[in-house]
């Protein structure tokens, strides 16, 4: 009895997994705007959103049902390693479906927020009560975004040119500093020569002073001898 119940639950789970897989494919297209854009264009922008929300609720219910089937299979007595492996595989499939579902919802929300930001005023209501877009059409929004991207590209190019000019100025300053350093090195190398020359002059001056002092002393001695004689 337990084996037959397990087989029934497993068949139901596989059937439900196939249905969820097909639903996720359609859900992904709608979330990306592929179906809603081709059907509604700019005439009824809320129709695609309504289809997305309806399909989102349907897939959530199917995921909950698949989770219940997996829990029911896990509650049955274990019939072997193959059954445990199959149950683990069903759980992994369910987890993968949930991740894909959450990813599609997140991407759809990001796309809607981006379009609302480009539209500026967003969705408005006409006097007849029917929804309409009061801002730019989709094509104009994309053209406007393209213009923004072009402006950003020009700004980046300007910044790159400024960086290149700054680099060239830094290279020129570095070369100037190198020339100054070379001159300083030359002057520092000449200082020992100058010091040596000054020492030689001082030695010669001292020698001349000694000679002059000796001559003066000799003359004084001669005068004294002459005076006393």
Image: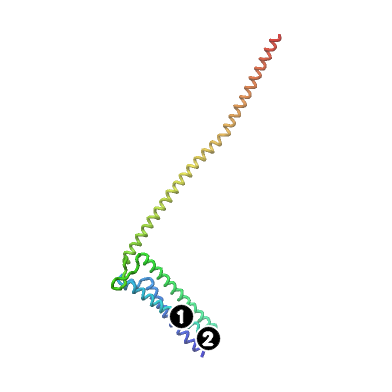
Helix, strand or loop at mark 1: helix
Binning the other alpha carbons within 10 Å of mark 2 as few (below 14), some (14 to 19) or many (20 upward) gives few
Q: Is residue 110 left or right of residue 215?
A: left
Residue, disc 2: 76
Q: Is residue 222 left or right of residue 27?
A: right
For this rendering, which residue is in front, 13 or 61?
61
Residue appearing at x 44%, y 72% in the figure: 103
Looking at the image, the residue that sits furthest to the bottom is 1
Q: Is residue 155 above or below residue 54?
A: above
Residue 179, image x and y in percent? 49, 40
Residue, disc 1: 64
Residue appearing at x 62%, y 26% in the figure: 203
Q: Is residue 87 above or below residue 37?
A: below
Residue 83, image x and y in percent? 52, 83
Dots 1, 2 in contact, CB < 8 A: no
Helix, strand or loop at mark 2: loop
Looking at the image, the residue that sits furthest to the front is 127
Q: Is residue 126 above or below residue 68?
A: above
Q: Residue 49, located in which quarter of the rendered image?
A: bottom left
Q: Is residue 44 left or right of residue 184?
A: left
Mark 1 or 2, closer to the camera: 1
Q: Quadrant of the C terminus?
A: top right
Residue appearing at x 36%, y 71% in the figure: 33
Residue 158 numbered mark, or none: none
For this rendering, which residue is in front, 88 or 224?
224
Residue appearing at x 36%, y 75% in the figure: 50
């Amino acid at each position: 009895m337990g084996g037959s119940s397990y087989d029934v639950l497993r068949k139901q789970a596989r059937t439900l997994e196939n249905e969820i897989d097909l639903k996720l494919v359609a859900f992904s297209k709608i979330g990306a705007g592929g179906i809603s854009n081709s059907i509604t264009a700019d005439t009824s922008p809320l129709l695609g959103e309504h289809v997305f929300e309806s399909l989102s609720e349907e897939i959530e219910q199917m995921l909950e049902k698949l989770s219940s089937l997996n829990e029911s299979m896990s509650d049955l007595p274990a019939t072997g390693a193959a059954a445990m492996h199959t149950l683990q595989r069903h759980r992994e499939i369910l987890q993968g479906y949930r991740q894909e579902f959450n990813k599609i919802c997140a991407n759809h929300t990001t796309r809607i927020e981006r379009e609302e930001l480009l539209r500026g005023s967003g969705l408005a209501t006409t006097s007849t009560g029917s929804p309409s877009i009061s801002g730019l059409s989709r094509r104009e929004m994309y053209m406007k975004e393209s213009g923004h991207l072009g402006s950003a590209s020009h700004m980046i190019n300007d910044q790159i040119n400024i960086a290149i000019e700054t680099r060239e100025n830094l290279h020129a300053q570095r070369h100037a500093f190198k020339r100054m350093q070379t001159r300083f090195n030359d002057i520092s190398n000449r200082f020992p020569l100058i010091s040596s020359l000054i020492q030689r002059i001082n030695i010669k001056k001292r020698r001349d002073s000694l000679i002059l002092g000796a001559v003066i002393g000799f003359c004084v001695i001669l005068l004294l001898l002459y005076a006393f004689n």
